[in-house]
Each structure stands twice: as structure tokens, then as C-alpha cells.
Amino acid sequence: MDVTRATLPGVATVVHQCVTRDGQRFGVLVEKSGRRRLVVYDSAEPDTPLQAINLDQREADQLADILHSRPVLDRLAHLERRFAEFVEAAR
């Protein structure tokens, strides 16, 4: 997937434009307030948004956890195990 990042001048919003291998286009707008907006674009009109989905910080975190290959709790448990191994080896 090709991802580009830009900041909208005067708005303090970061836009991540994504194009999948199949050519589907969507974006993630990150506002200064932390609110996120998922935007799906029309494949025939690449600059025309078909739909925007507003997410608050908690919803964005939940979606990120779903999309991530390993849930946050699994990654945290892995890091805790690695840290314990590191501490044990340092003794």
C-alpha cells in the first residue's frame, strides 16, 4: 500500500492518503483535537469522497487494535516477557 502524509495549512490536520495494491483510495484525517476521520474516495473520481466516518480517540484506538496483526494486550505481554528476560540476564 502506498501512503503519503501531508499537513493541511491553517487547519493543523494531518492527512494520510492511502492507495491499496488494487487501486482503492482512502484517507485518514487526524485533527489537532485527536479526532480522526476515515474518508473513502470514489474510484472513478479519485478526489471525490464517497463517505467520511468520524472517530473519537477511543474509537480510533479500538479500530487500530482490530487492524493490527496482534492485539495491544498480546504485544504488551510480549514486551513484559522480554523485559523480564532482560532483567534476569542482567543479574
Image: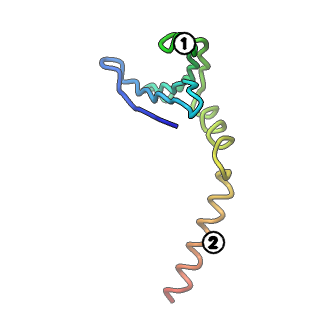
Q: Secondary structure at mark 1?
A: strand
Q: How far apart are labels 1 and 2 at the CA level?
A: 44 Å
Relative height, residue 58 to residue 39 (above, below)? below
Q: Amino acid at mark 2?
A: Arg
Considering every residue shown, the one lying at the far left of the view is 9
- Indicate left or right for 43 with 73 as reference: left
In percent of width and height, residue 69 lies at 65, 50
Q: How is the image coloured?
A: rainbow
In percent of width and height, residue 91 lies at 51, 89
Relative height, residue 81 to residue 58 (above, below)? below
For the point 30% across and 17% down, which residue is it? 10
Looking at this view, is 21 or 62 the one in front?
21
Q: Amino acid at mark 1?
A: Pro
Q: Secondary structure at mark 2?
A: helix
Q: Which mark is residue 34?
A: none
- Please say if the residues under marks 1 and 2 sit with CB atoms less than 8 Å apart: no
For the point 64% across and 52% down, which residue is it? 72
Among the two numbered marks 1 and 2 on one chain, the one whose residue lies closer to the N terminus = 1
In percent of width and height, residue 11 lies at 36, 18
Assess disc 2: are there few (<14), some (14-19) or many (≥20) residues with their C-alpha within 10 Å of its C-alpha. Answer: few
Relative height, residue 59 to residue 73 (above, below)? above
For the point 58% across and 25% down, which residue is it? 24
Determine which residue is flagged by label 2.
81
Looking at this view, is 48 or 73 the one in front?
48
Determine which residue is flagged by label 1.
49
In percent of width and height, residue 20 lies at 56, 32
For the point 67% across and 53% down, which residue is it? 70
Assess disc 1: are there few (<14), some (14-19) or many (≥20) residues with their C-alpha within 10 Å of its C-alpha. Answer: some
Mark 1 vs mark 2: in front? 1
Considering every residue shown, the one lying at the far bottom of the view is 91
